[in-house]
Image (cartoon, rainbow, N blue to C red):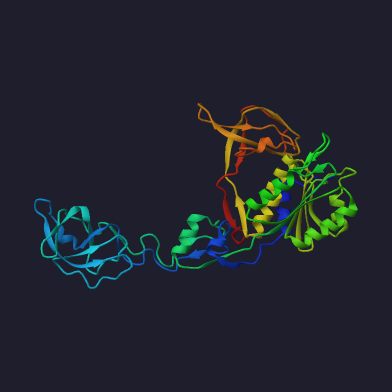
Amino acid sequence: MTLTSLATARRLALDALQPAHPEPVALLDSLGRFLAGPLVASRSLPGCAVSAMDGYAVIAEETLGATRDAPRRLRVSDTIYAGHLPRSSLQPGHAARIFTGAPLPPGATAVVRQEATRPAPDACVDVCVGVAPGRDIRAEGEDLLQGTSVLRAGQRIDAGVLGVLASLGDPEVLVRPPPRVAVLATGDELVPPGTPALPHQVYESNLVLLAALASETGAQVVARERARDDDDVLRPTLQRLAKRADVLITTGGASVGDRDRVKRVLGALGCTFLVDGVALKPGKPVAVGKMGSTAVVVLPGTPGAATVAFDQFARPLLLRHQGVREERRRVRVRLDEGRHKQAGLTYLISGTLERRADGLVWARVRAQGGGQLLGNLGAEGHAILPPGQADFAEGEPVDFELFDRPQYLSVEET
């Protein structure tokens, strides 16, 4: 098997799936999705100058020098609540009772907080402080000016984004539909959780693992099935699942052993492989192809290898369907232990980061193995051991790719 470099394989694999056509959806239904286009403010926020406090709208110059011992007395000519318009402009010698969020009357230049005032006879108020122009006023467009760019294409929609969208008054937002995903686990040794398992058998964890990883990208998992290593079983199962999904993910049967049948059956069904074997550990047997309009990702059967291969190939495809490319942060760290590897492969080793007393950031790397699952728990990212080097000493600097706080870029901008 000729292995493709990781960078080249990732680039080739993206041709297996194109972004879906955008569609408008209701705001709450868009949570976790990605904006299909940039958003420009359709109105200013706030839409006019409003009071930032409960108090009195005044002409600022008329309050200069006011104190509690020598207040400035003003006649209260209006009361303005949020959502209501002033009855008239504010005239010299007058104040308007105003509440938070209420529009400022024309002529007013400041707000005096109510605790800096006291009631006075004959519908008047005593202002006990001097205020500068603009005090406790939220100017029109202070948060956002009409016509300005608010959100870029590819922005993931979370609660904060939904709040902004709702504040602009649009009932719908343009996003791409989630990819439909079918997951198939193969292997005669597999038994479903909840049934007795003999020592030589394995509980099928990959179906749950991969379905969860797909769901985390925003995908819709439409099928989770298992099948024996038998061509007569695999053939109809793969055909049926491919018709239901935008992306078909298989796990197991990906290598070259006598019982590794998945790639052979897919090839016989007309699957065209864009990638077949990657210079990556764990995850070397991974393959990516197209069967009709369905993208197919063939993952190894060991959980650790399946997790890494999913992260590097299935995840980018599922995000691409939604119109985005993920860009993760990388930091330079030092290995907390020496490692030997195959010089021609890229190794991705899960781990956590630790800042030590010397001020340097160290990667606490986990045990490396295709079958390991516990090493993924709490991992902050992957230490990347690049090709072209076999031995890495303790303390040697390497790149560490972080899982948290990625940036999502529109595929049309990259």
Of 203 and 38, the residue lying toward us: 203
* Residue in view at x 74 percent, y 60 percent: 245
The answer to whether residue 271 of the structure is visible from this angle is no
229 with respect to 8 (left or right): right
Q: Which quadrant: the C terminus?
A: bottom right
Q: Which quadrant: the N terminus?
A: top right
Residue 240 lies in quadrant: bottom right
Residue 271: x %, y % from top left: 82, 58
Q: Is residue 104 above or below residue 183?
A: below
Q: How many marks?
A: 0
* Residue in view at x 57 percent, y 39 percent: 331
Residue 252 lies in quadrant: top right
Of 209 and 273, the residue lying toward us: 209
The answer to whether residue 333 of the structure is visible from this angle is yes
Residue 133: x %, y % from top left: 22, 59
Q: Is residue 345 above or below residue 86?
A: above
166 with respect to 10 (left or right): left
Q: Is residue 260 above or below residue 153?
A: above
Q: Is residue 4 above or below residue 62?
A: above
Residue 270: x %, y % from top left: 85, 60
Residue 166: x %, y % from top left: 47, 63
15 with respect to 48 (left or right): right
Q: Determine the residue located farthest toward the left in the rendered image.
A: 70
